[in-house]
Image (cartoon, rainbow, N blue to C red):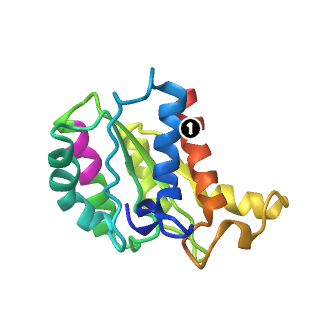
Amino acid sequence: GGSVTEGAGPAKFTDGYAYQFFRAMKATYAPGDGSNLIFDNAGLSGTSSLTGVVRYKKDVIDVLGQTPDLLIVEFAVNDGGEPVFQRSFEALVRDALVANPETAVMAIYAAATYGNTSGPKKAVADNYAIPQINILDIVNEGIKNGTFTKEQFYSDYVHPTYEGHQVMCEALMTVVATA
């Protein structure tokens, strides 16, 4: 993913959803101290799926020394609507599943005040039967029903606040719990 995955928004990047999710996974599913889990946040500000497909081997597989057991992919606020982004998103998902069919792949589509590009990605995720979460739908519904305000979720036009990252973490944990 891009800057949202990297942890932009809260005062400390380690309060981003990816880090919160890792801590929640350790607390919920890892025996003992959780040292059997390895975390690699390959989120990098400005990264689109076009760049992500190139970075996957070097910044994920090579860093871990193996294919991941769980890969979470997020490019919905950095990709444009052009077909090349849908194809690169699909290439990344396909590459991960071909390298290791046992890798669990999940797609999360971050929200921005200007929307996101979840539409073309949904077709890919549906085709590969991978779980997906559209945070934009959650945010818009939460704002509409008064659960939170736009200012409570967004620190600027795209990056979530600490609480916004919590929403993303909770959405991921819900998918894991139901999987």
Range drawn in magenta: 91-97
x, y (%) of residue 127? 38, 42
94 falls in the magenta region = yes
- Left/right placement of residue 14 relative to residue 156 reads left
Residue at the farthest top position: 31
Q: In terms of image quadrants, where is residue 59?
A: bottom left
89 falls in the magenta region = no
Quarter of the figure with the N terminus: bottom left
Q: Secondary structure at mark 1?
A: helix
> In this orientation, does residue 78 appear?
yes
Q: Main secondary structure of the magenta part?
A: helix
Residue at the farthest front position: 33
- Left/right placement of residue 133 relative to residue 66 reads right
The three-letter code of the residue at mark 1 reads Met
Q: Is residue 38 above or below residue 135?
A: above
- Left/right placement of residue 51 relative to residue 37 reads left
- Left/right placement of residue 110 relative to residue 1 reads right
x, y (%) of residue 58? 15, 55
Please name whichever residue, 77 or 63, is drawn nearer the observer in this view of the structure: 63
Return the residue at label 1: 173
x, y (%) of residue 102? 28, 27
Q: Is residue 164 above or below residue 96?
A: below
> In this orientation, does residue 179 appear?
no
Please name whichever residue, 27 or 92, is drawn nearer the observer in this view of the structure: 27
x, y (%) of residue 35? 36, 30
Residue occupying the point 72% across, 67% down: 152
Residue occupying the point 32% across, 38% down: 38
Residue at the farthest right position: 146
Question: Crowdedness of circle 1 by 10 Å Cα count: few (<14), some, many (20+)?
Answer: some
Please name whichever residue, 116 or 165, is drawn nearer the observer in this view of the structure: 165
Please name whichever residue, 20 or 145, is drawn nearer the observer in this view of the structure: 20
